[in-house]
Amino acid sequence: MEKRVASAGQLHVFLGAAPGVGKTHAMLREGQRLAADGIDVLVGLVETHDRADVAELLEGLDRLPARHLEYRGATFEELDLDAILERRPGVVLVDELAHTNAPGTEHDKRWQDVATLLEQGIDVVSTLNVQHLDSVNLEVEAITGFEERETVPDVVVEAASQIELVDVTTAELADRLAAGRIYSPGRTGVARDVSLRPERVDALRGLARRWLVEHRAGPSPRFGGLRRGGVVVASLTGTPDAERVIRSAADLAASRRAALVGVHVREPTGLVEVRPAWLERQRQLLAECDGRYAEVSGIDVVRSVLEFARSEGAVDVVVGATRRSRTDEWLHGPIVSRFAKQAGPIEIHVVPSSSPTPPLARVHRRLPSLRLRVAIPARRRTIGWCIAALLPPIVLLGLLPLRSSLGVAGALFAVLVLVVFAAAVGGRGPALLATALGVLIADFLFTVPYYSLRVNRLLDLAALVAFACAAVVVGTLVDLQARQGVRIAAADAVAESLARLTAEQVGLGAPITAESLGALRRTFDLEGLAVLELQEHGWDVVACAGTRFPRSPSEAHHVVELDAMKRLALGRPLGSDDARLLRAFVTELRLVREAGQLQHLAELTYPRRTAKPAPRVHAH
């Protein structure tokens, strides 16, 4: 590490097969060597575990005080990133690269702190056990029987300028454990039973050596370089094994030099869903594996995932072995077999379950609370209350001459129509008012004895009770639909505004990449779209997205001029629902382009007025 890189710091990692092999000792000895060579070495954080040999190696090194954080009544020592950046040493020693930081720090993981130091041009020496590497997580679980939750993306370690494997014999490791030189005396027995059994250490040692051989030849294709193998799609669900699915898909994508995409299917219900915590964890893991997250809406999970995979041009889909109840299997059919039957040319990879039958972490759905429900506009609510208060007495009084032929059942049916009308306009409150008034007035006018609230016949009483229950249920359902309509209208307005804003950014010269084209294609549900550039021999495709994208303006459904030589060619929409949104996008893009041309013309015609910026044009 004597040779420094001006733009970015260098990382030196001591990799071990198991705790106790001497990674921290090796790191501190490297620090002593660098300090002896005249390099400014700072000990950022070292896990001493109250061991005298570690304290002895720290002597003579400049040590930074740890940052103390309080969380749930406990005190944690974390790396003081701000103090290191202010101090700006030549080299920082940071132990335990895979450590998870306590809440309240700038980053969730210590490797993110290290990445920040490297970006600032500070060299870092750190330590790591092989079981914390993300790509070998499933193999480590198979060896140890336990899932390792603290992992480091392989790209972080692969970027190191130097990786040294620290290893000792199994016998020496056992002697260190017995002597209390690895863990405190209270944890020695547990460590011997769980992680430091000789057969497990041998397997982890082989895993570490294999990883070094496979990953030190060059940068991992999973985290950079040219993508050659298409797309690998991972199905994201709320099962405990979903993280295994992501890692398996990431390994498959790495082996095929393919892009990784995780897709979550959200059921389009009118119910309010609590944002599941597992989805955020999986999205974070997907990002660490250099994957892209996508979300689609659909009732049939299998069909939705396969349609998404086909639209992305994927040939591999990775799913988890489900552990659904027999009732779910009976209602919806076995997921894996349905994937196999409907996949066609797509290859389905099934990741087996890691444990027998733990309960599934289901997504909790509940009816909207008063706080979370979509608000109906005030004018509609007022009209709804008027309908509920006035129409039931007016209609029932109007039907009074037909009392002998209609009976109480006919009167209640007429009131039910009014309940639905009131709920559709004003929501659940007016529907309940219409129900209550309808029951009372029907009882007063249409049941024997007339003009009293008593009911002599059991059949009439049953009719009133049944009507009240049915009206409440129907009114609530219609209220949900009415509010869902308000939600959809608001979402459409927001989507149209975002479409116009996106068009404005594109028209004002924002760069169009293949990633942004893919987002546009999914947003507008297009077969494909492309940026075309006019050359001497014809049109060339500069960037594209989708499986069937236009290769010339004549093949496109919509064409918009980006500049004198480039065109944005949009394919045919797959569905009619997004046609209006697509038209808004295209219209705004054309208007912004025309405004830019007019501004350019004005600058050429009136050069003295160019100091004042031209107004931005918005289409409404």
Image: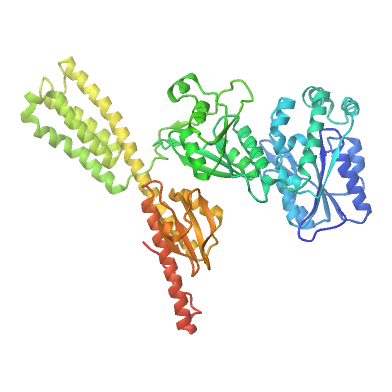
Residue 216: x and y in percent read: 79, 45
Q: Nearer the viewer, residue 426 or 27?
A: 27
Q: Is residue 186 visible?
A: no
596 relative to 42 in the view: left or right: left
Residue 212: x and y in percent read: 80, 40
Question: Tell me, what colour scheme is on the image?
Answer: rainbow
Quarter of the image holding residue 371? top left
In this picture, is 284 found above or below 619?
above
In this picture, is 110 found above or below 326?
below
Q: Nearer the viewer, residue 141 or 433?
A: 141
Q: Is residue 590 visible?
A: yes
Residue 36: x and y in percent read: 94, 52
Residue 160: x and y in percent read: 78, 48
Q: Nearer the viewer, residue 229 or 511?
A: 229
In this picture, is 591 found above or below 248?
below
**Of all residues shown, which one is farthest toward the front?**
537
Count of labels in the image: 0
Q: Quadrant of the C terminus?
A: bottom left
Q: Residue at x 73, y 55 (%)?
A: 119
Q: Nearer the viewer, residue 70 or 187?
A: 187
Q: Residue at x 19, y 32 (%)?
A: 415
**Of all residues shown, which one is farthest toward the left?**
401
25 relative to 247 in the view: left or right: right
279 relative to 521 in the view: left or right: right
Quarter of the image holding residue 471? top left
Q: Residue at x 93, y 55 (%)?
A: 37
